[in-house]
Each structure stands twice: as C-alpha cells, then as structure tokens.
Image: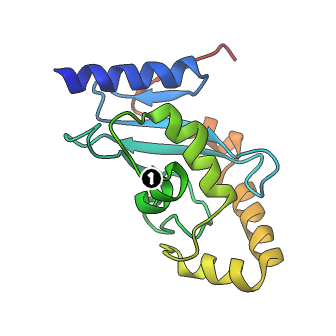
Amino acid sequence: MLWRRRKEMDIAELLMRDFKVMREDGFDIFEVVFHGPKMSPYEGGVWRIRVELLPEYPLEPPRLFFVNSIFHPNIDFVSGLICSNCLYLDHLETGWTPIDDLAVTFQHCIPKLLFDPNLECPTNPEAAEMLKHDEGHYKQLVREFCEMFANMEGMLSEKSSGHEESGSED
C-alpha cells in the first residue's frame, strides 16, 4: 500500500510540472509526453515515453522506453529502452535511490542524457560510433529522426487506449 501511494504521488508530481500522463487503470505502466530539450539536436521533438514501475519501485528505478523512434547512443534502437545505468549513474552521481522520483527523471536525467550521451556503454553502437567520429552527421540524423518520428502531428494522430491526464490546459 505504501508503494502504491508513492506511485500516485510521483504521477501527481509529473502532472503538477505540466507533463502529460497517459495511463490506464493502474499506476505501474503509463506513458509520459516528453519534449526534446532546447538548444539540443532533439529540440522540437515530442516523444511518448513508456514508464514501467516494477514491484520493487522506488527501491529500484523505473524502466523507461521511448515509444516513438529516437537516435541516441544510450537508447536501444529497437525496443526504445533507455540504459538505466547511463541515465542514473551518470546524471545523479550516486545512481538511483528511493528518494529520487519521476519528476527528477523527466526534468533532469533524461534531458541531461540527451545533451551528454555516455559513449562508454552504448546500447546503440552505431549512434555512438557516429557521434565519436562524425558529430555533424550524427546531429543531422538526430534532427531527421525528430522530423520523421517525433512530431506533434504524429503524436496527436496515434490513438492511446488509456485516458490522458494533463498538468496544464492546452
């Protein structure tokens, strides 16, 4: 019961920070609409990120998946899974702890990972190699992916089986 309350509070915190949350009946699996950070090659992109809160949450970090395609060294190209080691160890310094929450993840960790990929442990080796050896081509490809797969029109036309909650009026 305690962990269910924590999940409810984390979702409420996302809503208060103006994230759109799409969920079905439970609190274990839902999607969050995420906008690419300004001043990055991901600027202007809009993604749905599936959040899976494991039974051990918040003792264990959430599993996060980009639903629509993104080109990044630390995000699996096929599944969209974000490498949790890269996401939390690199950007929270101490790694995930139970005091961390989803708002920190979406406001701090994911944007920082997009700005500063970890090339030491890539889940998309092609993206890592391209960034290492041809940053201009990498950024161009990232922008092309944003235009093709991460645009608001595509987001609005896709149907979601869950209901949408919004932290702000559009």
Q: Quadrant of the C terminus?
A: top right
Classify residue 123 as left or right of residue 96.
Answer: right
Instruction: Tell me the quadrant of the picture where the N terminus can be found.
Output: top left
> Mark 1 falls on what kind of element?
strand
Q: Which residue is mark 1?
A: 65
- By what rule are the colours in the image chosen? rainbow
**Residue 77: percent from left, percent from top:** 51, 69
Residue 94, horizontal then vertical, whole percent: 43, 51
**Quick check: 77 above or below 51?**
below
Question: Which residue, as the protein is rendered here, is positioned at the far left?
Answer: 1
Crowd band around label 1 with a 10 angstrom C-alpha radius: few (<14), some (14–19), many (20+): many
- Amino acid type, residue under disc 1 in the picture: Phe
x and y percentages locating residue 74 in the rendered image:
53, 66
Q: Is residue 32 above or below residue 91?
A: above
**Residue at 61%, 78% in the rendered image:** 128
Image position, residue 45 (x, y; %): 71, 48
